[in-house]
Every structure is written in structure tokens, then in C-alpha cells.
Amino acid sequence: MEQLGLILLKVLFFAAIAGVFFFVIRSFVRSSKEDKRIREGWAALPRLAAERGWTYEQRARGRATEYCGIGPMPGSGDNLSAWHYVTGEFRGRSFVCFEHRYNSPISGNQPGDRKRPTIESLFMVSTPRSVPSVEILRPSMMNVVVDRRDKMQLGVSAFDDTYRVVTQDEDFTRSLLSDDMMSFLLTDPRAKKSPLQLRRAELFTWYTGTLSPSSLDDQLNYLCDVLDRIPERTWTAA
């Protein structure tokens, strides 16, 4: 019986070792596939820009600085690079999109780790005129801990429970967030993962991750769909 127990322990030990190796190999294969997908997406961007008459720069030094204060961008900075910087016209509106990269203080802390920057992709389209600042965000613990700005209440519980609205002009924001707009933001699946920010004469959205032709089309279409639902009187009253 004792010998049988030792054999069983050995079997379990080798099974555990095999499981660890399997997990490591699977993670490596998955990471390799993801790296390949990302690089293919990057390689396709200049081709897409050329086909559509857009401009493309792999790295536009200093061009990201003007967008400090937007979404995941820092509040201030100097000579910030915009990676995979694409500009042009989409559905009759001027647009800009790019990746912002930064090193997170909590990444790559273990010896031998390859430090990878955190990548945020930002998208913006032009609006008919400059307007007060409005942010339409999903509530998160980060909002509670870091962002202490007052949340605007629209008086529609479904919307107020789903979104955190921060604005400089409540009258303009009420005109912007019409019944049709609130219904759109509550039902369109893109709105669940795409925050919005109006600043001056541009509407922004962003996500954590890299740029690709499909994500570019998806996000720009979403921003244009939002703008199409804003009544003309909202712009004239701003």
C-alpha cells in the first residue's frame, strides 16, 4: 500500500509538471498569435490610408501633445509622439486617430520581464462648431477614487445609473442628450465600451489596445453615428 501511494504521488507530481509546461506553451502560442495579429493590423494601416487618400505617419513626434487632457491622455506633456497617426475625411468629417504609448509603473517589475508599453488608441472627428466640454463615461471605481468632479444628473434613472456625465454647461448637455441620444447610448452595443468626450470642435472616443483598419472604421462610424443624432439646434445654441 505504501509503494502504491508513492507511485501515485509520482504520477501526480509529473502530471503537475506537465500541466505547467502545457500552460506555458499555450500562453506562448497565444501571445505569438496576438503579436502577429497586431503587426498585421499595423502593416495594413498605411495601405488603407493610401487607398482612401488619407495621410499616415508611423510616428508623428509632438502631435499627441495637443490632445493632453482627453480620455487616457496625461493632463499635460511635452513632445508626445502619436504612433500610427492617420488623418483624413470620413463620412464628410475630418478625423484624426493615433496610438498613445506610455510605460506603466506596475508593468515589467519582475527580473527578466520585457517591458511593454501600455497602448491607448484615440479617435476624433470634427464637429460643426466649438462647444463646451462634455464627457460621457461609464462609472468605475477609478472615478470614485481619482476623479472627484461632480456628476450631472439627467433625471432619467436608466441613463443616470449607466453613465457618468461631466460637463461645464448643463444647459448645452441637456440639449445634446436628447431622448433619442440617450436611447441610442443605452441600446447601441458600441456605447458600452466607447466613452465619449466633446472638447472644442472635436468629438473623441478611445480604448486600450492597438489600431487596425477594422477598429478605425468601427470607431469612426460610431462617432459619426453619435454626431448624426445631435439636433442642429444644439450646435446653434452652443
Image (spheres, rainbow, N blue to C red):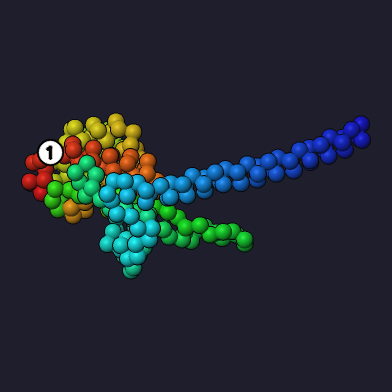
Q: Is residue 170 left or right of residue 61?
A: left
Give x and y (percent) for residue 204. 27, 49
**Residue sticking out furthest to the bottom:** 78
**Residue sticking out furthest to the front:** 51
Instruction: Describe the element under mark 1 as helix, strand or loop.
Output: loop
Residue at screen point 92% across, 35% down: 3
Q: Is residue 127 left or right of residue 18?
A: left
Three-letter code for the amino acid on which mark 1 is drawn: Pro
Please state, as top left, top right, bottom left or bottom right, where the N terminus lies in the image. top right
Q: Quadrant of residue 67?
A: bottom left
Q: Nearer the viewer, residue 194 or 52?
A: 52
Residue at screen point 34% across, 68% down: 79
Q: Nearer the viewer, residue 124 or 212?
A: 212
Q: Quadrant of residue 82?
A: bottom left
Q: Check disc 1 and report the residue beneath it.
A: 231
Residue at screen point 17% across, 44% down: 173
Q: Is residue 18 above or below residue 94?
A: above
Give x and y (percent) for residue 49. 32, 49
Give x and y (percent) for residue 237. 7, 46
Q: Is residue 86 above or below residue 37?
A: below
The answer to whether residue 77 is seen in the rendering is: no
Dot 1 alpha-carbon crowd within 10 angstroms: few under 14, some 14 to 19, many 20 or more: some
Give x and y (percent) for residue 113. 59, 59
Q: Nearer the viewer, residue 236 or 12?
A: 236
The answer to whether residue 129 is seen in the rendering is: yes
Residue at screen point 46% across, 47% down: 40
Tally of marks: 1
Q: Nearer the viewer, residue 147 or 61?
A: 61
